[in-house]
Image (spheres, grey):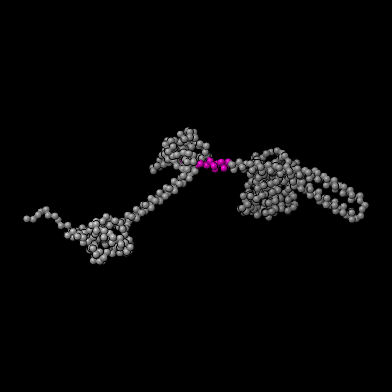
Amino acid sequence: MSNAHAEPVIDFRAIVEAAPVAIYVFDLDDIVRLWNPEAERMFLWRAGEVLGNPIPIIPPELHAQFEANRRRILAERTLAPFETLRMRKDGVRLEVLVHPRLLLDEHGEPWALLWIISDITERRALERERSAAEEQRRASEERFRKLLERFPGLMWTCDRELRITSIEGGGLERRGLSREQLVGTTLIENTNPDHPTVHAARNALQGMIAVLRDHEYEGARYDSYFEPLRNAAGEIEGVMGITLDVTEVYEARDEVQTSREELHRLSKRILEVQEEQRARISRELHDDLGQKLTALQFDLAHLERTTTSSAVVTDRLHRMSLLLDETLQAVRHIARELRPALLDHFGAGAAMEHELHEFERRTGIRCSLTIDPPDLAVTGDQATALYRMLQEALTNTTRHASATAVDVVLRKEGDRLEWIFRDNGVGFPARRRTGRGLGLTGIRERAAALGGTLELSSGAGGRGAVLHVRLPHSGTRQSQP
């Protein structure tokens, strides 16, 4: 009688052939006895090339490992899955996961080994990529953290109620604060309702970007930047800001400004003392030495007229008279250069006109002076400054310009005086347009001492130099030579 419930016969070979993973069987002599289609696809060896032959996929450098695993499974009758490398027919190494099984005969004795192999090359590559990316992310976060720790300020966000939601930066430790103290508090709690940062943050909530410079908080000075914090839908959900501690910068700037003002005051005083000394020496040369030389000239002339001495004595007296005339002229010229009387009695216009006339006579360079309005009176400190500027400019023209003409304009524009000096020479090289030469520095300092400015440029086509000085017009205040 037949058994209707007899167990079906399992076709082991059919299962192996249809398996979605590489499976091969090799006997105790390492001869391949089974090689399924997936093994063909994975390792590129056809079954006909492998069956009856030694296993071809063990990399040479892993033969010792393979033998150790084979001995172990034979000794222990089991072996846990392990990862290793296997080699395709074209020599490419694959990373694989091996599930080893020991096959027994009807007597329970090992007769072959079955290797189930999964290709994990791509998975491991992805894992390495993820690991590398994670390492890069951690390194980037560490760098960012260190940057934040060294950042001399704060980077923060707050919600629509101006409640601080995050805050980072070296400014925390610098001011003895911690994020735990500040997160959850509002900007108003940390300042006051009328503080500029509160107004700027509220403007950011309305969609505006704000920059707030030099605001104070707990004795320090800050520059801050505010902009809306938007969500993925573009809706404003808060404010993000950067607050930079600029206390030292502004203190240094204030010190530089104070030093600059002190230097201007010192420069102005030096110029005043210089003019005082020039005026004093000029008066002494003109009033004392000039008078004495004039008296000596009269006495010498009297001797020439009355002497009855020899021709040698008469000739000597005549030569002495000529030398005395030259000395007197030199003294008068030096006195005039030190402080021309025209400057004190008739103002800047007359003194500059005389200076330009003498310059044209000495150098042959054509000179012109335009005063607008013609009756413009400039005296006192401004007259002295303009006259000295002209002397400096003419000296520069003689030394550097190779010019044939000079034009000077003095005019009144509103409540300001404008003095413009032009020549038709070679112009300013780029390196000299900053006005760092001694002559140009002197002009700049004289203008600054009177609250004015100097602007340098070249004429059309880069030819010629233009000096443009603007001064506040101070009327007819007299200088104190």
Name the side, left or right, on which 308 lies relative to 365. right
Q: Which residue is rendered at x = 27% and y = 55% of the image?
A: 81
Q: Nearer the viewer, residue 470 or 396?
A: 396
| Magenta span includes 387 | no
The number of discs equals: 0
Q: Residue at x 17, y 57 (%)?
A: 10
Residue lying at the far front of the rendered structure:
75
Q: Where is residue 345 shown, x and y percent of the image?
A: 75, 41
| Residue 389: image location, x then y, percent | 69, 46
Residue 222: percent from left, percent from top: 51, 40
What residue is shown at x 70% (from left), y 46% (from top)?
388
Q: In the orientation shown, which residue stands out farthest toward the right?
A: 308
In which quadrant will I find the N terminus?
A: bottom left
| Picture residue at 67% right of the left edge, 39% below the top | 474
- Residue 14 visible in the current orientation: no
Is residue 64 in sight in this rendering?
Answer: yes
Displayed quadrant of residue 34: bottom left
Q: Is residue 433 left or right of residue 378?
A: left
**Residue that lies at the very extreme toward the top in this rendered image:** 193
User: Residue 261's image quarter?
Assistant: top right
Q: Which residues are magenta?
A: 241-254
Looking at the image, which is closer to me, 9 or 332?
9
List x then y, in percent, for residue 409. Answer: 68, 46
Instruction: Name the residue nearer the viewer: 214 or 167.
Output: 167
